[in-house]
Amino acid sequence: MKITSKSALAAITLLGLLQVVWGQEAAEPVPLTLQQAVKMALEKNPLRKAAVADTKVTSADVRVARSALLPHLTFSETATRGNDPVYVFGTRLRQGRFTSDDFKLYKLNTPSPVGNFNTRFGGTWNLFDSFASTHGINRAKEMDEAAGHQLERTDQEIIFRAITSYYDILLATKQLEVAEQATKTAQAILDRSQARFDSGLVVESDLLIAKVRAASRQQELIRARKNVALAQAQLATTMGVTLESSFRISDVLSERIPRVPVLQEMEKKALATRPDLKRVQSEETAQKQNVAIAKSSFGPRVNAFAGWEIDNPTFVGGGGNNWLGGVEVQFDIFQGGAKRAELSRQRAFQERSAAMKQVADDGVRLEVRRAYYNLASTRQEVEVARAAIAQAQEGFRINQNRYEAGLTTIADLLGAEEAAHRSQSDYWDAVYRFHTSYANLELASGTLSPQSPVMMP
């Protein structure tokens, strides 16, 4: 068989593709800790990118507001041509080419067309506007601070989402382990029931009940696997990566009980540190500047202006130039009550901002209390669930022995098995809710960060 260079190249290419595919299939999922998940979420989550963009917008608004204090310069280049009498008269005069012959009546009434190239430099400078520009700059600064506080709050919310998504996987993994163990137990009960039925020790209904329980446990196992996959997809979305990203959770859900803080301390800390409360306060201050701007509109304005222009009959020159400058004082005498209406409008917004600040304070206090009570109750649930596991397992063991001895029915045995299964599931669910409740309390108090105690599962 003759091997050509083309066939050899194709074989090498195919081998390379197979190696790539095999490498992708054989690649191990990337291990992922909670700290890494939070760090990645803060880097790639689109909500944070949007919040960062908002800070850039408000920062640009500050620069725009400051520009009102600086002079504004303009340049223009205009080419015109026409025979309008007034235009021709003025153009020749500006070009410095006016002669006594141009005073003839027929030239004044029906002049010949004239072209003009006008080059103009102009400038205006607001010297005084009753401090409206200063108030505008202060307002822009306050809104910039508000955007910064909102970015900080967005970071905390993203951290909370990453924590809950990570713990969702930890819980789903534990529930999968419980489901696998329950499936094995149900299969063992089915095997014993089959053996006892074959021996004539039980009726067929016992065997059928055991088969139904085994099928039910299989369904629970399927749902548990689905929950793990869904929790991984949720974490990937929170981290801002593709849903096809493969990672392996490094931590294990465990009962690690951090110190529960004092309620009054958490409320006090929340009112002092919550970024969203600081944002509301900055917005309230910014609204006060809006009221000041509305008041400034009643005052006078002083503007300076200047201009220098060149008028040439051709683009290369041959004409004249002139300049003009001056100072203007403006004072609005009457505008139909529009300014007073605007002042009333801004004062109403200020009253609304003050009321919303009180609403925000009350809402934060309620959030802290709700999170604190949830944390306290879930801690008690963990203790109760932990004790219930040992009791349920002991009850299941006793019922197993009694069923083997023919002293109880399979319904009692399966009831005891269900209690043991449920106790484990409830325990891990309580542990999960305790950790997420702790994170929620820190979120409510405004102290959630990558260094929080809940970051260690």
Image: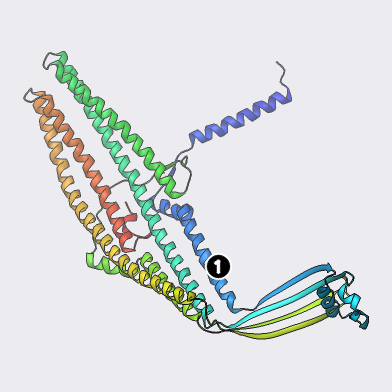
The foreground one among 374 and 457 is: 374
Q: How is the image coloured?
A: rainbow
Residue 209 is left or right of residue 150, and the answer is left
- Residue at the spot 27% in from the left edge and 48% down from the top edge: 432
Among the 4 quarters of the image, the one containing residue 159: bottom left
Tag 1's secondary structure? Answer: helix
Q: Is residue 37 visible?
A: yes
Work out whether 203 lies above or below 54.
above
Residue 214 locus on image (x, y percent): 24, 25
Identify the residue position indicated by label 1 in the image: 60
Q: Is residue 318 visible?
A: no
Among the 4 quarters of the image, the one containing residue 153: bottom left
Work out whether 171 lies above or below 284.
above
Number of residues whose C-alpha sits closer than 10 Å to that of mark 1, classed few (under 14), some (14–19) or many (20 or more): some
Residue 421 locus on image (x, y percent): 20, 36
* Residue type, numbered disc 1: Ala
- Residue at the spot 20% in from the left edge and 56% down from the top edge: 376
Quarter of the figure that contains the N terminus? top right
Residue at the far right: name it. Answer: 101
Residue 269 is left or right of residue 159, and the answer is left
Work out whether 313 lies above or below 415.
below
Residue 102 locus on image (x, y percent): 90, 79
Among the 4 quarters of the image, the one containing residue 408: top left
Work out whether 390 lies above or below 133.
above
Residue 181 is left or right of residue 99, and the answer is left
Residue 316 locus on image (x, y percent): 88, 71
Give the total number of marks visible in the rendering. Answer: 1
- Residue at the spot 29% in from the left edge and 63% down from the top edge: 363
